Amino acid sequence: MLTKSYHRDILVVPLEEEVIRIGNSLSPEDLEKARSFLARIKPLLATKECVFKQSEKNISFDRCYPLTHEQKVNIIKTLVAEDCIKVELNNNPRYAESEVYVFIKTLMLSSYGEEEEVTLYIKMYLNEEKHYDIVIVISFHSEGMHD
């Protein structure tokens, strides 16, 4: 579980209350895929084998909530399979065999003294190469900013 983590004037804390989801739209197979995916990426996150793409939406989020790489990784470490809302094929032709996992996570972010509840949209996949694996985070921003 993510504990309080400080960087400059930013405080990241998960919500104390669990968000109750009524009906998960994932099939049992996709829920198991999400569990397996999270188990596979945990060791990579521990060694910081994680890249955050610099899309316009991610950059905009970073301006509002300037989290460090480590803080973002710590948020990803708190994800559970039930946070996953979608498993889909990667639309990038270079990684067409990779599955993309979309997660929604609500937590409290405090930036420069202003604490607020933020629902994050996190979209990522595992890039498996011959000699190494790396987690690619396509989206890390507020929910509602995605297409």
Image (cartoon, rainbow, N blue to C red):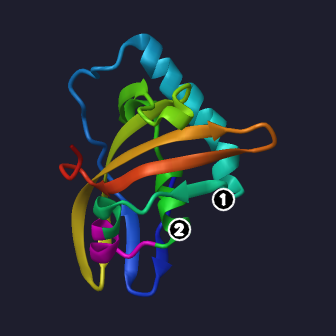
Q: Which mark sits nearer the N-terminus, 1 or 2?
A: 1
Give the prevailing secondary structure in the magenta stretch: helix
CB atoms at circles 1 and 2 under 8 Å apart? yes
Residue 41 percent coordinates (x, y): 62, 41
Q: Which numbered circle lies on residue 112?
A: none
CA gap between label 1 and label 2 equals 9 Å
In this picture, residue 64 sits left or right of residue 38: left
Q: Is residue 11 depicted above or below 22 in this figure?
A: below
Q: Is residue 103 depicted above or below 137 in this figure?
A: above
Q: Residue at x 38, y 37 (%)?
A: 102
Q: Which residue is mark 2?
A: 69
Q: Which residue is mark 1?
A: 48
Q: Is residue 7 depicted above or below 138 in this figure?
A: below
Q: Nearer the viewer, residue 53 or 15?
A: 53
Q: Residue at x 27, y 74 (%)?
A: 64
Q: Nearer the viewer, residue 7 or 145?
A: 145
Residue 29 percent coordinates (x, y): 46, 12
Crowding at dot 1, Cα within 10 Å, few <14 / some 14-19 / many 20+, comes out as: some
Q: Quadrant of residue 38?
A: top right
- Could you tell me the amino acid type at mark 2? His
User: Magenta part of the protein: which range?
Assistant: 60-67
Within the magenta stretch, is there residue 87? no
Q: Quadrant of the C terminus?
A: top left
Residue 50 percent coordinates (x, y): 60, 55
Q: Residue at x 48, y 50 (%)?
A: 137
Label 1 SS: loop
